[in-house]
Amino acid sequence: MDETARERLIRSASRLFHIRSYSGVGVQELCEAADVRRGSFYYYFPSKEALVSAVLEFEEADLLTRVFNPAFEAGAAPLERFEVFLDRLYEYQVDRSRTEGGAVGGCPIANLGQELGSQHEHLRIQANAILDRFTHMFEDALDEAREAGDLSADVDTKKTATRVRAYTQGLLEIGKLRGDNDVLPELGLDVRGLSVKISSDR
């Protein structure tokens, strides 16, 4: 099915923001990339910031489809899901680099949230909420691993999930700065090594 003008704008913005940044791309360039008239842009989006909100929704759906759901809704053992997750994330990053001219863009959601968060609070909140939902998927898998005895009973799954998120974001940041997606498989993801113990003063 052919994409609508709105869908083309979102997809073009996703690509251009990822390889260049929000501030580095103007409305006219977005319209040209999407083959949409400038006047039509404002029919679909009252502002460039409104387009970012739609792009964040698009990025979330794309990551769920290509990375998170295949990893965490599969029948693998809880800790094995993290291995599948990292493999899927690596494949996703490599594919984006291939289709985006070789650029290594890092995390598209964190990029936009960090770039725009200080000027547009609602976009920071939206980006963080998406990453929080991903983190809850980590936590659910960790809860299952603890219940199955694959993690010790004193592991704080909420804090460990947040640490896994921080570590993963760090890998993506290093990959972006080095221009090398291979950082992900080279460093891997050791969930047990990232585990946080439940504090005794709780």
Image: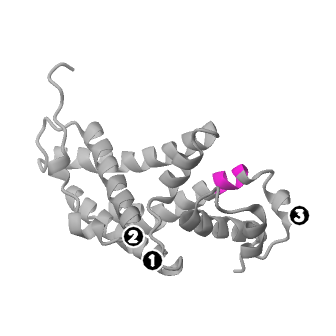
Q: Residue at x 38, y 45 (%)?
A: 136
Locate the C terminus by quadrant.
top left
Q: How crowded is mark 1: few (under 14 residues within 10 Å), some or many (20 or more)?
A: few
| Residue 68, position as x, y percentages in the image | 40, 61
Residue 74 visible to an observer of this rendering: no
Mark nearer the N terminus (3 vs 1): 3
- Residue type indicated by callout 2: Gly
Amino acid at dot 1: Asp
Residue 39 marker? 3
Residue highlighted by disc 1: 95
Above or below 6: residue 116: above
Which label sits on residue 197? none
- Residue 192 is left or right of residue 101, and the answer is left
Q: Determine the CA span between mark 3 and mark 2.
A: 36 Å
Helix, strand or loop status at disc 2:
loop
From which residue to which does the magenta span run? Answer: 49-54
At numbered mark 1, what does the secondary structure look like: helix, strand or loop? helix
Viewer-proximal residue among 141 and 135: 135
Tell me residue 93's x, y (percent): 42, 70
Main SS of the magenta part reads helix
